[in-house]
Structure formats: structure tokens, C-alpha cells
Image (spheres, rainbow, N blue to C red):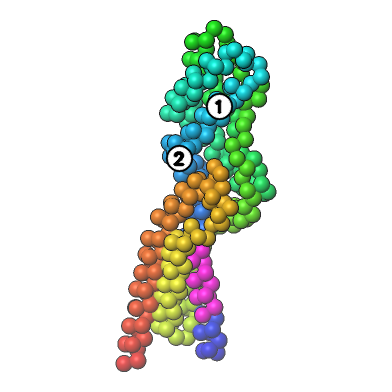
């Protein structure tokens, strides 16, 4: 009977270790990747990236000058004026709104099964560019009938839709792990040893969290974090994930070491 109780306690501790290792990464992914607001909070500062600014402004200029209704004789004057105004687009409310819409569309594309195109409506940006341009030209420039452009093709990431289903429950993994540890201590015949093993489980869980944070760049496939347009966004998430998980893993590891030490001390005192 004693052996059976200790075996059951060990099984509970193994479950607690797994839940403890999953808890912090899954919670972070839910709050900052799966949740739209968290996603936009991380991608918002990327609006200041020159490459992203150039991508959006150049796409708007191409839409303007590529319209067949624009007379050929005016394009020579239109192009430099449009490029000049496009350079001032960043920092405006129009650009901020455009960037937020682009990131919202990207978030939707990432959690849609299968590869999908990242389409963005540049209509407001085109109006903002052409308004001052038309003051310096003798004619009004026609707006494109369809101001939508495809910035990139977002690859299929099958793991993300699965994450969106699982991670809402991640917040309960930590409390569930604690409940399992308490249950193991109550069931075990050798509670001091079980306490030491619980600490070892905390060490393993913390090491797993630390390892995942430190190695996240190697875990994410190059097809994702090197993809056009998407790549820099993914790399930003990797940096934030690493910055969050590495210290949290160390804290969890330290807490496990403390509990394990306490258990070993109690075992030693009991034997005396």
C-alpha cells in the first residue's frame, strides 16, 4: 500500500512538472500572440521601422502612378511629387491607422488555416498623398478603383490555429500544477522525499521554460521568421518571448531548488 501511494504521488508530480513547464510559455503566447490586442501592442512599435514604412509608401505610389487613367504627360511630374509626399506619410494619423489595419489583417491571416495573402486597403494613404500633390498640378489625379494591394503571402502555420484553441486554458495550468503537488504530498507515504521530488520537478520545469526562451530563434522554422514582410514581425515576437521566458524560467528553477533543498533537509533531520 505504501509503495502504491508513493507511485501515485510520483505520477501526480510528473503531471505537475509538465503543467508547470507549459504554464508560463502558453500564457505568454495567449496574451501576446493569440489575443489580438496583445499582438497589436507588440507590432505597434514596428510602424517606425524604415523597411515597413518604405513598403507601404512605395506600394501607395505604385498604385497612384500605375493607374491607366493617369495621363502619360503628367506622370513625369506626378511621380516625384507623390514620392515626396509618401515620405511624409509616416508619423501621420493616416499611417498609424493604416499600420494598425495591416497588423490586424496579419493577425487574422496567421490564424486562418492555409496560406493566405496579406491584403491592405491603401485608399486613405493615397488620398493623403494626392491632396497636396494636386495643388501643384493642373489636373485632379484619379483615384484607383481598387486601392487594395497584396503586401505578402503569409505561409500556413498549422500550430497557430491549434494554439488559439488550447492557450485560453493555459492560465489554469499553474494552479492545476500546484493542486497536483499538494495532492501528491497528501497521498505520499514518504512526504519529505516527495517534497524534494516536487522541488526537482520545479527545477525541471524552470529549466524547460528557460531553454525554450533561449532557443526560440532556433525552434521557429526559417520559412516563417525569414519570410518576406512576416519575418521581421516574427523576430520581434521572438525577442519579446525570450526576454520574458528566460528570467521567468530562472525564477521557477530557483523556487524548485529551494523546495528541493527544504525537502532534503527534512529528510536528513528525519533520519537523525
Part of the protein shown in magenta: 10-23
Tell me the quarter of the image containing the N terminus: bottom right
Farthest right residue in view: 114
Indicate yes or no whether the magenta region holds residue 45.
no
Depth order, front residue of 86/98: 86
- Nearest to N terminus: mark 1 or mark 2: 2
Depth order, front residue of 89/109: 89
- Name the residue beneath numbered marker 1: 60
Residue lying at 54% horizontally and 84% vertically, measured from the top left:
7
Indicate yes or no whether the magenta region holds residue 18.
yes
Tag shown at residue 38: none
Crowd around label 1: few <14 · some 14–19 · many ≥20 (10 Å)? many
Crowd around label 2: few <14 · some 14–19 · many ≥20 (10 Å)? some
Helix, strand or loop at disc 1? Answer: helix
Tag shown at residue 46: 2
Q: Is residue 66 left or right of residue 217?
A: right
Residue lying at 64% horizontally and 50% vertically, measured from the top left:
156
Amino acid at each position: 500500500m505504501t509503495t502504491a501511494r508513493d507511485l501515485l504521488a510520483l505520477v501526480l508530480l510528473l503531471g505537475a512538472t509538465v503543467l508547470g513547464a507549459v504554464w508560463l510559455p502558453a500564457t505568454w503566447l495567449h496574451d501576446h500572440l493569440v489575443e489580438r490586442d496583445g499582438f497589436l501592442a507588440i507590432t505597434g512599435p514596428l510602424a517606425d521601422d524604415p523597411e515597413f514604412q518604405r513598403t507601404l509608401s512605395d506600394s501607395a505610389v505604385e498604385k497612384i502612378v500605375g493607374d491607366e487613367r493617369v495621363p502619360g504627360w503628367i506622370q513625369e511630374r506626378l511621380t516625384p511629387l507623390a514620392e515626396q509626399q509618401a515620405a511624409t506619410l509616416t508619423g501621420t494619423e493616416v499611417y498609424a491607422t493604416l499600420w494598425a489595419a495591416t497588423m490586424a489583417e496579419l493577425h487574422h491571416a496567421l490564424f486562418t488555416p492555409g496560406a493566405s495573402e496579406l491584403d491592405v486597403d491603401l485608399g486613405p494613404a493615397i488620398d493623403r498623398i494626392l491632396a497636396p500633390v494636386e495643388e501643384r498640378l493642373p489636373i485632379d489625379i484619379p483615384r484607383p478603383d481598387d486601392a487594395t494591394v497584396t503586401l505578402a503571402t503569409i505561409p500556413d502555420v498549422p500550430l497557430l490555429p491549434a494554439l488559439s484553441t488550447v492557450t485560453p486554458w493555459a492560465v489554469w495550468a499553474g494552479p492545476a500544477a500546484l493542486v497536483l503537488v499538494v495532492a501528491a504530498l497528501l497521498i505520499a507515504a514518504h512526504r519529505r522525499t516527495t517534497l524534494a521530488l516536487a522541488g526537482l520537478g520545479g527545477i525541471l520545469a524552470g529549466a524547460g521554460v528557460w531553454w525554450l526562451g533561449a532557443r526560440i530563434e532556433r525552434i521557429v522554422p526559417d520559412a516563417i521568421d525569414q519570410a518576406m514582410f512576416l519575418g521581421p514581425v516574427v523576430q520581434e515576437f521572438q525577442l519579446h518571448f525570450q526576454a520574458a521566458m528566460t528570467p521567468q524560467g530562472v525564477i521557477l528553477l530557483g523556487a524548485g531548488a529551494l523546495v528541493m533543498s527544504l525537502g532534503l533537509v527534512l529528510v536528513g533531520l528525519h533520519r537523525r
